[in-house]
Amino acid sequence: KKNGRYVTYYSNGQLIREQEFKEGKEPGYLRTYNQDGTLKWDCNYEDGKMQGQQVQMYESNLYGYFVKTSNYERGTLVGDYSEVYANGNVKDKGQYDKNGKKTGVWISKNMDGSLTDESEYKNGVRDGKRKSFFVDNTVSKIQTYKAGELNGITTEYNYKTHKPEYETTYVDGRREGPFKVYHEDGKTVKTEGEYIRGNVAKQKQYYANGKLHLVQEREGNGFKTLEEYDESGKKK
C-alpha cells in the first residue's frame, strides 16, 4: 500500500502530481499541475474522502479557463460553491445543504458578468422563482417551480420592449389553465384562452384597440370560430 508522499513528473521535470498516502488512503492533500508548473488542482482528503476546501481549474472550449471552488465534509459537497472565469467574473455561484443538494439562490453569468440565470433551489431541485435573461441583462422569462417542476405562471418578455409578451399557467410541468398573449404595449391582451391537458381548448382574440375579434374553440387539429367582430365591436 502506498504510504507517504507520492509524486509524478512531466518529461520536462515539472511536477504532474503530488499526494499524501497513509496505508493506501489519502489522508491529506492532492495537488496537480499543468506542464508549465501552474497549479491545476489543490484538494484535501481525510480517510480517502474529500474534506474542506477544494480548488480545481478547468479548461473548456466554450468558457476557456475557469476555477471551481467547493467545500466538502467527509466526501459530501456542503456550503459555498463557485465557478469563476479567468477574468475574475463569476460563472456559477450558490450553496449546497448538509446533504450535498443545491439550496437557496443560484446564479449563472456570462464571461462579461451579465446574468444568464437566477434560480431558487430546495433539496437539489428548482423550487420557487427562476429568472432567465437576455444578452443585454434584462429579464427574458420568469418561471415558478415546485419540487423541480413548473407550477404557476410563466411570464415571457419581449426583447425590444422589455414588456410582457406571454403568460402561461403550468401544473406539474404541463401547460394547464389560463394563458395570455399581449400586444406590444405589454398590457393590451392579444389572445387569451385556456389549456386543458397541454392543448389550447378555447381562446379569444382581440384587436390592438382592445375590442374582441374572435371567439374560438378547438376542433380537431385546428379551431372553430364561434363569434367574429370588426374593430368597432360590431358582430359579423
Image: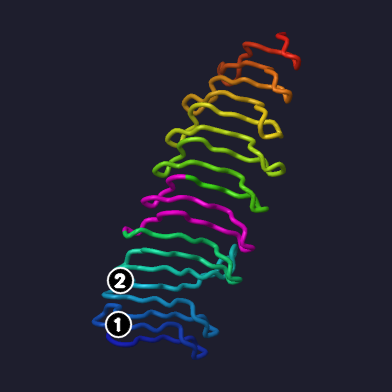
Q: Quadrant of the N terminus?
A: bottom left
Across and down, in percent, residue 84 comes to 54, 67
Residue 35 lies in the magenta stretch: no
Which amino acid type is marked by label 1? Phe
Q: Nearer the viewer, residue 48 or 148?
A: 148
* Protein image colouring: rainbow
Q: CA distance from mark 1 to mark 2?
A: 12 Å
Magenta stretch mostly in which secondary structure?
strand
Across and down, in percent, residue 94 comes to 46, 60
10 Å crowding of disc 1: few (<14), some (14-19), many (20+): many
Q: Which mark is residue 80?
A: none
Do the residues bearing badges 1 and 2 touch, measured as CB atoms within 8 Å? no
Residue 102 lies in the magenta stretch: yes
- The answer to whether 198 is drawn above or below residue 66 in the figure is above
- The answer to whether 170 is drawn above or below residue 7 in the figure is above
Extreme residue toward the top, this view:
236
Q: Nearer the viewer, residue 56 or 61?
A: 56
Q: Which residue is mark 2?
A: 49
- Which corner quadrant of the image does residue 66 belong to? bottom right
Q: Residue at x 42, y 64 (%)?
A: 80
Q: Residue at x 43, y 41 (%)?
A: 149
- Along the horizontal axis of the image, is 144 left or right of 86? left
- The answer to whether 108 is drawn above or below residue 155 in the figure is below
- What kind of element bears circle 2? strand
Q: Nearer the observer, disc 1 or disc 2?
A: 2
Q: Which residue is mark 1?
A: 21
Which amino acid type is marked by label 2? Lys
Across and down, in percent, residue 125 comes to 41, 49
Of the numbered discs 1 and 2, the one sitting upstream in the chain is 1
- The answer to whether 165 is drawn above or below residue 178 in the figure is below
Across and down, in percent, residue 75 comes to 32, 67
Report the span colored magenta: 99-128
